[in-house]
Amino acid sequence: MIDFDFRPATPGDFDFLFSLKKNAEYEAIKAVFGWDEEVQQRIHHEEWQEDQPTIVTVGGQPAGSFLLQDKGEHLYFCRFFLLARYHGKGMGSKILQYCIELADAQRKPIQLCYLQGNRVGSLYQRFGFQFTSEDNAFVYMEREPLI
């Protein structure tokens, strides 16, 4: 298992986070919407203005990101990306478990969505997330808290 830590994102992470998202979602975005670099840069800027994610670090170097937003009645899990070299090493499971424990402690469900064609859905299912709906672009899931 790889040791990793969390830290808040800083303005210096902005470009890393765009590159991380592009590497993780390029094919899925291209298949669903078509990839337009300007549009994706604008969306990234808007997301950054809304809220900054948590940076996952390995040896002090950025390795991924996630964001767990409190929406009042539920938590929303998003911007969950890891550099490809860390896929399949248990990091994603540990991060997801951490977020689930936070949600359970608050007795709040976690909602999320992901792009059609993204293989992350199987990870979410293993952690108890249930399908709530889907459309041509996205799959929506929710996990109720363990009480």
Image: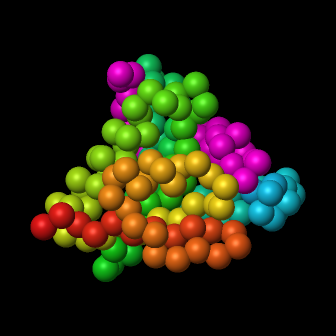
Residue pictured at 58% horizontal, 48% vertical: 119
Direction from residue 62 to residue 109 in the image, left or right: left
Residue pictured at 52% horizontal, 77% vertical: 133
Image coordinates of residue 22 in percent, x first then y, are 72, 45
Tell which residue pokes out farthest to the left in this image.
Answer: 147
Point out the image quarter for the C terminus.
bottom left
Residue pictured at 38% horizontal, 41% vertical: 93
Tell me, what colour scheme is on the image?
A: rainbow
Quadrant of res 33: bottom right
Q: Magenta segment range?
A: 1-28
66 w.r.t. 130: above or below: above
Q: Is residue 69 visible?
A: no
Q: Main secondary structure of the magenta part?
A: helix
51 drawn magenta: no
Q: Is residue 141 visible?
A: yes
4 drawn magenta: yes
Point out the image quarter for the N terminus.
top left
Image coordinates of residue 78 in percent, x first then y, are 50, 58
Quadrant of res 71: bottom left
Q: For this rendering, which residue is in front, 16 or 35? A: 35
Direction from residue 128 to residue 31 in the image, left or right: right
Image coordinates of residue 146 in percent, x first then y, are 18, 64
Image coordinates of residue 10 in percent, x first then y, are 53, 44
140 w.r.t. 42: above or below: below
Tell which residue pokes out farthest to the bottom in this image.
Answer: 73
Direction from residue 25 to residue 84 in the image, left or right: left
78 w.r.t. 60: above or below: below
